[in-house]
């Protein structure tokens, strides 16, 4: 009987820990929207959750003459090791949010060249591997 | 300084990227049933008999297409005046009795709503919101529009940011919902209608300012988007006659766009951190070669396709 009770308790505790450890990337991406700088119109929110790959990637067509902002929100400040990098259509890296060991929470990109851009999120010393991000624009 | 010049020809890099995605994901392709005959029977886009590509890949392409709102903002920022005559009448909803028509015109009205919002034409905006709600109800996605809140926000121009935010979120939620429900065909139609309406408005404005370089470039750079819309529609050409017909029309438009040349010059970017934000200086450039004749052809073809959609 003791073994059964112990087993049930263990299952309950492990389930609770699992719930605590769950990633609510949607909530974090929603938190990012109002954190876009003044004047930027919201376009997209992105969930950052580590899956099978080492990175999470989205794409978006950026337009010449438009300034874009991408920010990062994570449970641990400032970005919990989440780094956003921007690549152009030929996979040239045009921006990254980690510089001199510092994690920056937002990048602003005044676009000069219309085309597809790849927004890639990587994890550098992350503890939760979970976050959200928002993309905004202004002319 | 390292510099590279890449000319974007008939097939854009995006399309190449997507092509690679098609190759790499083909093993996991989800064929949701539907032989040729069932496709023919699906005359109304009401049921998704199954695209020739996984929902995940379709979702990725859909996600990358820019919002028509960006064009509306560009038009306003360039000093062009509001003109309701460019828009589809909000009274046309009774004409849209099929799910195909509802979905594609939901996109058209979405762009029209964004245009009225940007220009703070709240009276018109409320009419478009009502039409959108009606079409969305017909597609069983009306729950995403809180028309009372939107109507309240629209009564005060100080609420513009909130109004733009809530409408953008609503449309994003619809797309996410449709993809989860394996009804991405409606998202594709919705996106196509919205894009075509934005192109139509830009062509109309450009016709009144033919020397405006910025407007000509906006029209020219739509070549990149069009190639992806064609790719999305092509996934449904064997299962949905309406989408196959729309694809044929879009391919005609693409023939006009094939004469537009986009030249891309890469140069390494630089950056500085300002107030906690990394501000990038994009040193690359792109030029868009588009003639007055190209624009005239694109405008004529766009008007023709749009007339079919909104009638």
Image (cartoon, coloured by chain):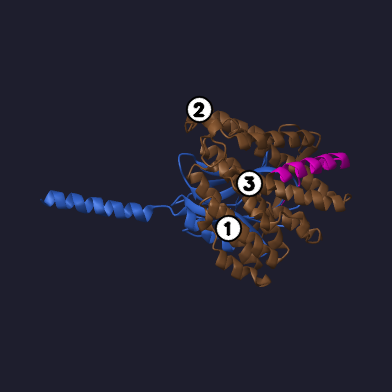
Q: Is residue A113 left or right of residue A79?
A: right
Circle 2 marks a residue in which chain?
A: B
Q: Could you say where residue B255 lies in the image, as x and y percent from the top left?
A: 77, 33
Dominant SS in magenta: helix
Give me the residue at 65% from left, 59% from top. B128
- Given residues B250 and B245, the one toward you in this image is B245
The image quadrant that residue B87 belongs to is: bottom right
Location of residue A128 with respect to B121 vertically, above or below: above
Give me the residue at 56% from left, 67% from top. B149
Residue for badge 3: B104
- What's the magenta region? B281-308
* Among numbered discs 2 and 1, the one appearing first in the sequence: 2
* Among numbered discs 3 and 1, the one appearing first in the sequence: 3
- Given residues B153 and B71, the one toward you in this image is B153
Residue for badge 2: B35
Circle 1 marks a residue in which chain?
A: B
């Amino acid at each position: 009987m003791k073994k059964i009770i112990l087993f049930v308790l263990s299952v309950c505790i492990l389930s609770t820990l699992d719930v605590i450890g769950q990633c609510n990337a949607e909530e974090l991406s929603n938190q990012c929207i109002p954190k876009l700088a003044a004047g930027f119109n919201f376009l997209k929110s992105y969930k950052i959750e580590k899956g099978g790959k080492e990175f999470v990637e989205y794409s978006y067509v950026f337009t010449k003459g438009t300034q874009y902002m991408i920010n990062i929100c994570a449970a641990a400040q400032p970005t919990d090791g989440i780094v956003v990098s921007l690549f152009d259509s030929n996979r040239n890296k045009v921006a990254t949010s980690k510089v001199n060991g510092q994690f920056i929470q937002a990048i602003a990109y005044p676009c000069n060249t219309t085309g597809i851009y790849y927004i890639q999120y990587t994890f550098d010393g992350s503890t939760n591997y979970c976050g959200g991000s928002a993309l905004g624009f202004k002319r | 300084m390292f510099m590279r010049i890449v000319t974007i020809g008939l097939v854009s890099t995006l399309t190449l990227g997507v092509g690679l995605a098609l190759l790499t994901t083909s093993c996991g392709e989800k064929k949701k049933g539907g032989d040729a005959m069932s496709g023919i029977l699906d005359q109304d886009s009401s049921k998704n008999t199954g695209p020739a590509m996984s929902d995940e890949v379709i979702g990725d392409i859909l996600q990358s297409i820019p919002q028509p709102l960006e064009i509306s903002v560009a038009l306003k920022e360039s000093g062009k005046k509001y003109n309701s005559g460019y828009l589809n009448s909000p009274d046309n909803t009774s004409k849209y009795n099929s799910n195909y028509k509802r979905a594609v015109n939901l996109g058209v009205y979405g762009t029209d709503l964004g245009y009225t919002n940007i220009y703070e034409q709240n009276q018109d905006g409320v009419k478009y919101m009502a039409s959108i709600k009606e079409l969305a109800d017909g597609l069983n996605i009306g729950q995403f529009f809180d028309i009372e809140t939107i109507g309240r926000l629209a009564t005060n121009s100080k609420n513009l940011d909130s109004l733009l935010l809530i409408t953008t979120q609503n449309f994003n939620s619809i797309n996410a919902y449709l993809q989860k429900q394996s009804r991405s065909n409606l998202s594709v139609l919705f996106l196509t209608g919205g894009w075509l309406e934005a192109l139509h408005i830009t062509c109309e404005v450009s016709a009144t300012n033919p020397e405006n370089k910025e407007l000509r470039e906006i029209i020219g750079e739509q070549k990149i988007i069009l190639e992806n819309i064609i790719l999305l529609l092509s996934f449904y050409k064997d299962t949905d006659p309406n989408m196959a017909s729309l694809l044929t029309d879009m391919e005609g438009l693409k023939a006009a766009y094939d004469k537009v040349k986009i030249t891309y010059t890469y140069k390494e970017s630089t950056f500085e951190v300002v107030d906690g934000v990394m501000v990038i200086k994009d040193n690359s450039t792109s030029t868009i070669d588009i003639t007055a004749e190209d624009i005239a052809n694109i405008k004529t073809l766009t008007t023709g396709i749009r007339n079919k959609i909104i009638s």
